[in-house]
Every structure is written in C-alpha cells, then in structure tokens.
Amino acid sequence: MPKYAEVLVNVANRRLDQSYYYVVPENMDLKAGMIVIVPLKNRRVQGLVTRISTELSEISEDVEIRPIEAILEGESLIPEELLELAVWLAETTICPVAQALHTVWPFLKGKAEQWYIPQAGMEDEDVKVLELLDPDTFCVLKVLNRARRGGLPEGVLLKRAKVRPGLLEEMLKQGWVKKELRFTKASSLGTKKSLPPTKENKVSSFLWQESPHQLTAGQAKAWQTIWDCYRKRKEETVLLFGVTGSGKTEIYREMVFQVLKDGGDAIVLVPEISLTSQIARVFLEQFGDLVGIIHSGISLGEKLALWEKILAGEKRIVIGARSAVFAPLPNLRLIILDEEHDTAYKQDENPKYHARDVARYRMKQRQGLVLLGSATPSLEAYAAAQRGIITIASLKERYNNMALPTVQIIDMKKELAKGNKSLFSIVLRQKLRERIQRGEQSILFLNRRGYSTFVFCRECGYVARCPNCDIALTYHSQKQKLCCHYCDYSQDVFDRCPDCGSRFIRFFGQGTEKVEEEVAALFPDVEVLRLDTDTTAGSNKHKEIIERFRRGEVPILVGTQMLAKGLDFPNVTLVGVISADQLLYRPDFRARERAFQLLTQVAGRAGRGVKKGEVIIQTYSPGDRAIIRAASQDYPAFFWEEISYRKQLNYPPFAHILRVILFQEKEEKVIRAANDLADCLKRTIEGREEEDYQILGPAPAVITKLKNQYRWQVSVKGKNPDILRQIVHSAVKAFFQGISSSGINLSIEVNPLAN
Ligand code: ADP
Ligand code: ZN
Ligand code: ZN
C-alpha cells in the first residue's frame, strides 16, 4: 500500500501555512518531523513532514500526487510527541499547523543551503600537485577536507577559503567537488525523535530538602486523594477545591516533592508569573536549581538555553505562565494549574488554546496527572467533578482556622436616596478612616475600564437585557441604541426607567479612574498606590509596588482585577469593591461566573494575617445571586444556581460555542460578509442530520472597531465540538468562494472565554 506524507512547506515562515500531500517512495525511511525536498508547481522547496498515513481523505482522486524527492534532514526537527501535540492543537483550535508548531517548539527555524563536498582526499597525487599549480583550488579543498560534516555551505566556504565566487562553479565542472542541498538547523535542539527518559532520577540523587512545613490533617487528606490518583498512572485530572488561604501552595509543593522522588518531572502553571512570584519563591527555596522559570521577559536565546537544560534533565520543575505548558520535560508526569479558572490561561492569538486543554492532552500522552487548583473553580471543572469525570479534593478551612472575612453588601441606590452621590458609600469611607487611624492597610478594587457601556437606573438598579439571550445590552454612541452582541437585537435608549419611572439613568463604563482622585480628596495626607496595566507596563514596576505595599509603607492600594490573583498581604484588613455592577453587566454569558470569582478572590485578600478581615461590596444590584453568594463565600450554592441557568439557556458546559469574527476597514463590507457567512452556516446546518445547532448573529463584536477595522461576529452553538468545527470549516470554505469574502479577515475561536 502506498504511503503518503503531509508536508508543511516553508516552515520557517510562520504566516504561510501550506500543507501538501506527497507519495513516500518505497525505499525511503521517512519519519514525521524530518525536513524533505518536494516539488511545488515548477519549483523545488523544503518542507517539514507533519504526518504520514496510508489514506488521503481530503484530496480528490484526479489530483496528481507527486513523490517526495529527498530527505534533507534525517533527524526529526522536533520530538515526535510535541509534533503530535502541535497537529492536535492546530486541529482543535482551528489554526494553521505552522503557527501551532512555532508555539509548541519555538526553535524550528533553519534553512536549506547549497553545500560543497570534496570529491578527492588531500592524499591524492592530483591534489598535492595543485598546491603549486593552483593555490586557490588547493585552498578550497583543504578547507573542505577539514570540515566536520564532510563539507560546507557555500557562504561559509567562501569566507574561510577567501576565494572568488566563480571558482566554486569551475571546480564543480572540473569534478573536484560536488554540490548538495542540505538543511542547517538554527539550534541543536530537537535532534531526538522522542523525549527520552533521562538517566535515573531516583531517590539516590535526592539532595534537595524536605518541605519546611508539615501538612495539616485536612491538607494531608486532600493530598492523599491526589496522590492516589497520581499512582494509578492513568490520564487523570483532579480538582483541588480549597477556599482562599487554605494552603493550596503547600499541597502543590508536597505533590511536586513526591513526584520528583518518584522519578517524574512537573510543570507548575500560574496565571501571571510576575505577580505570583510567591509560588516561584516557595519552589526555589525548596528545590533550588532544579527549578526553571519561564517569565514573560525571557528571550528566545535564554529560552533555548533553558530548553537545553530541561532536555538534559538538569531542570525537573518548570514554573511559568500559560506557555510553560509546552516545556519539554523528559519525564513529565504532573502539570499543576494554580487558579485554574483564570482567563489568562486562554491565549487570544493563534493558536487560541486553553492551557488546561493542552495540559490534559499532554498528560494523556504520558499517563500523568493534571492538578487544577482554585477557590472558585471554572463552572466547567466543577461540573466535570460533579459528574464524576474528574476527581475532587477539598480544603474547607483556612490554614490555622483563620476566619474568612465578613462581607457586607452596600446598596448604592440607598446611598443616592440619602443624597450621597460620590463613588464611596458612607460605610466604606468610615471604615477606610478607621484603618488609616489603626495603621492597617486597605485595598480598593475597581474594574478595568471596559470596552462596553451599559445603561442602568440608579434608583431601582434596572439594567436592560436582551430578551433572546439574557445578556446585558450595550450602549452604542453612534447609533444611540442599546444592542445585544450575541444576536443583534437592539432597542432605543430610555430616559425614564421602564421599571420604576425614575429619571436617574446612568451610563456606566466610564469614570472609574476617578477613584484615585476621590480617595486623594477624602484623605489628602495619605499616600495611595495604584496597580493596573497602565501603571505597570514593566513587570519590575509591578514588583516594586507590591513590595512597597507588602512592607506596609502605604496604607491604601487601588487596583484592578490583577489584585485578585493570589497575593498574600498579612496587614490588609479591609477590601472595598467600588462597584460590582460593571462585572455583572459585561455582555458575556459568563459575566456572573466572572463576577462571583473576582469578588470571592478579592475578598480572599482580606484578613490573611492575625487580624480578621472585612469586605465591603458596593453595588446597585444587591439582590444578584453572584453577589449574594460571593458575600457568603458559598461556591457550591452559586454553582448549582448558575449551572441550572446555563442549562436553561443552553450555554456551556451544556453546549459549545464557535465564534467567527470578521474584520475589515469598510463597515458595509463587513456587514455584508457577516450576513453571507451566516447564510453559508445556515445552509451547512440544514444539510445535516443533527438538529441541535444554532446560529447566533450576525452582530457587531463587543469591540466594534479595532485598529481601524470594523468587527462583526457570527457564532454557532451546539453539543458536539467536532461537528461544530466541521460545520464552520465547510461554511467558511463556501464563504470564501463568494465575492463578499474578498478582503475580509476572519478570526475563529472555539469556546471563546470573553468578548
Ligand atoms: P491558598 O493558595 O489556598 O490561598 P496559601 O497556600 O497561600 O493558600 O496559604 C495561606 C498561608 O498559610 C500561607 O502563608 C502559607 O504559608 C500558610 N500555610 C498553609 N499551610 C501551611 C502548613 N501546613 N504549615 C505552615 N504554613 C502553612
Ligand atoms: Zn428604575
Ligand atoms: Zn441577544
């Protein structure tokens, strides 16, 4: 039976993604990951073999399939396991294989060059004569004969021999040398066909120290559950569900310690490495040089050096943000995702992967364990645990039985009735003053300035929602309308509340930057620190601010959601949430889940020291279930309410969503194209047996204009993600055959996390 190879041509160019099929000649020992020479139109080009199979599913029979000409690089350029991962990544996230490859293995670059190989040895009589008759030719042969790989690329040869370029052609004609196309790798990595287990890493080489802490009884029990799963050596996922301050880090540390003792390696993922240096610190303290850290500022060269150490078995633990999930640890058996619910685990650009999915795939390849940790798990993870698909281990108490903070919800409608129009409620002002007097610290939490504005009633809290999707409507200033970003429903803006008739209608979405000003006005003698993406372009500045605050030098820290990510400040006894509403009314079906998570996490920052903490949540919607449950820190109750809501409206995890964003400079063109794409989708779905696939939109994207391009979106919702992918694939293909597609850019995303 003939074998076929899928070859990615021009792999060094990450934007081009062209895979072609070729026949593998019978006597050729071809493996995935090798570099080959193939004919393309009337040229010969190099390419990377991504797959070898006996079937040709996507090619119609009348296409002539040509054979591979030659192998250019006989050793795989990327370990097979990671190549497999890249192909899977491209498939599941619908992105070009080339982009997935560069993400998984960032050292693929290399080039094909003309090499010169000597035809005669230096001992030959003919050559000896040359030394006198033709010193230049003699010199070329001398250089070539000394070369390690039996020859040299043209450029290098000319430089070393210092001869005129024409000479090489003459020598070729005279038969002194031959010419050959060869591949030069950019790095020495990836010459191994698979990640080999390094030499024994067993107990004998066990020099690092035990943890300085003893696990509490509750922690030991949770740890045992996780360890039992690990010991099964099946692909397993465990959710470590532990309230804030329960000591999840201690459990990670003990797991890693035991896995290392068992001969395995581990990856520890954190949402943001600059902020969570806390985890890095704990691990460095205990495991020293065995820890490799991948931070955002790492250069490709430094990464290469780290990869070499990892492959050599010198690093056994890799800590980092999202992309560290690809670290090529030879004995990888454990991947931990701390704060697994965090949206930073999803990449916005191609490949739009979620680190959790990649972790699960890698541990499936390896029969290892994925450990997800959170106080506020993603609905998907907790639902999977409830259905018995993954195991759950719980930590119900804070370490040392420290009390969870008390949370008070402040109804801002009542503040208005009392005549208080400022951003701060009377209670929050008073509590802030108390903290300053007592020398304790406070955190004020506000939301990142959103892209969207919603409209609400300051007297009764009414917010307009889409009747079809139950998503908060967003105000569009150009059209002066309230619109739904899922289905394009729209209505006029009201100047009187439809519910209570009040005229106190407010446009929310601007003005949050005023918090700092208002604090300054209230407490003119007090220094205030601010932490958000604007003030912290460089990660060092981050650190500085956090360290100053940790040392207790400044009484008040104002910050965005960055604050929610696992920081541990012992002297903070008050957390004030300026407005929970902006969280609740984001145009996203996950708005409530995010709101609950953020509020709970932020509240968890209070009272982590000896003194008990207090949290104030200000809102115009004090009755919202996300706020009530966050206030009582009751995740399970929130989960059951939210999951039944999701079921009712058929949102994930009960369905999957595949979203296509179309963008282009001319708005009319984008709208027309979006409508055509929706039609193509409709026709594709109608042609299928299954009925449960639903089109949402077209509608303007939440970010309606970005970099001068208008953006519209169309989504498809349905049960089976594979079928969704097929539907979108065929529809997009049909769409590109129509005229309205010309000049239109598409961005496709599977289960988008946010807008
Ligand atoms: P979480 O990540 O669950 O919010 P942490 O891991 O940050 O909690 O733990 C909270 C605090 O309790 C940390 O300061 C940690 O050092 C301490 N702690 C937790 N468990 C132990 C233990 N078994 N022994 C000593 N200190 C502990
Ligand atoms: Zn009202
Ligand atoms: Zn809608």
Image (cartoon, helix red, strand yellow):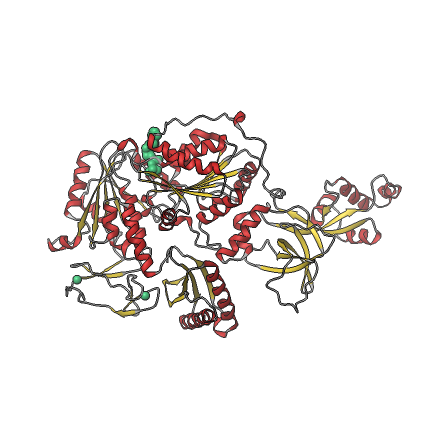
* Residue 441 position by quadrant: top left
The residue at 50%/73% (across/down) is: 738
> Can residue 267 be seen in this snapshot?
yes
Quadrant of the image where one finds ligand 1: top left
Percent position of residue 414, x then y: 13, 53
Quadrant the N terminus occupies: bottom right
The residue at 47%/30% (across/down) is: 288
> Can residue 448 be seen in this snapshot?
no
Image-based side of 543 in relation to 570, left or right: right
The residue at 35%/50% (across/down) is: 379
Image-based side of 367 in relation to 61, left or right: left
Percent position of residue 171, x then y: 81, 51
* Residue 672 position by quadrant: bottom left
Image-based side of 71 in relation to 609, left or right: right
Quadrant the C terminus occupies: bottom left
Percent position of residue 238, x then y: 41, 42
Q: In the depicted view, which residue is nearer to us: 173 or 428?
A: 428
Q: In the depicted view, which residue is nearer to us: 228 or 522?
A: 228
Q: Is residue 204 above or below residue 31?
A: above
Percent position of residue 632, x then y: 23, 44
Q: In the depicted view, which residue is nearer to us: 170 or 26?
A: 26
* Residue 128 position by quadrant: top right
Q: Is residue 690 above or below residue 416?
A: below
